[in-house]
Image: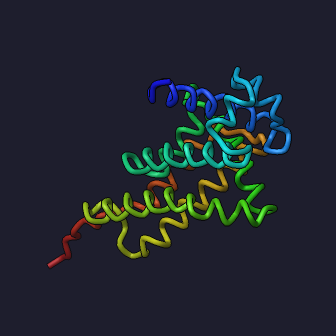
Amino acid sequence: MSQDHLDARRRQILDGSRVCFARFGYEGATVRRLEEATGLSRGAIFHHFRDKESLFLALAEDDAVRMADVVAEQGLVQVMRDLLAEGSDHPADWLGTRLEVSRRLRTDPEFRARWAERSQQLTAATRQRLLRQREAGNLRDDVDVAVLTSFLELVLEGLVSHLAMGLPADNLGPVLDLVEESVRRHRVSAQVRPA
């Protein structure tokens, strides 16, 4: 098989698995369900991935890379806007993966250790984007970039929780506008003092 064919097969496995993990969770994504979701045999799936956990980690890492790319170009708030956008690429499936990562981080120390190596991508991309914005004079300079990074990551986690609970999301655009505005530098206009 050519490398292009192997890469396409790997993408097919990741895309099908994303749907399966989002629908059934990690525990419920049995090998049979993974076979159905990907349209491939267990041999084909596990030729590319050592086991189910390696597949899930690869999927979560793939999502983290996609998010980091959006963050680098447009910022973390854009990732949140994409989650709310109608017709965005697999927002419900991405959300399902993100929720499953959060659950496993709380309950599985081994997974937490493996995930720690990968989770820094998004933080690093957010921090680099904020540093570039600060250098361009667009970011407030009275708060450390590390604090702003943590703030935006907490907002993302809150949004994910909000969506996971099935709460209405149609009024969250203005909330994200407020979040974005809160990290921007506000230019103070020179005021003329009376003579």
Q: Is residue 195 left or right of residue 139?
A: left
Residue furthest to the left in view is 195
- Which quadrant does the C terminus fall into? bottom left
Q: Residue at x 65, y 49 (%)?
A: 57
Q: Position of residue 176 (x, y in %)?
A: 53, 49
Relative side of 9 to 22, left or right: left
* 120 lies above or below 56: below
The image shows residue 61 at horizontal and vertical percentages of 57, 48
Q: Indicate how the structure is coloured in the image.
A: rainbow
State the residue lying farthest toward the top. 39
Residue extending furthest bottom? 195
Q: Identify the residue at image location x=84%, y=44%.
A: 27
Q: Is residue 141 left or right of residue 152?
A: left
Q: Nearer the viewer, residue 99 or 158?
A: 99
Q: Nearer the viewer, residue 145 or 141?
A: 145
Instruction: Find residue 22 and report its image quarter.
Output: top right
**Residue 42, x across and y down, in percent:** 75, 30
Q: Residue at x 60, y 54 (%)?
A: 156
Percent position of residue 152, x then y: 53, 60
- Of 74 and 51, which appears nearest the observer? 51
Question: Does 120 appear above or below 53?
Answer: below
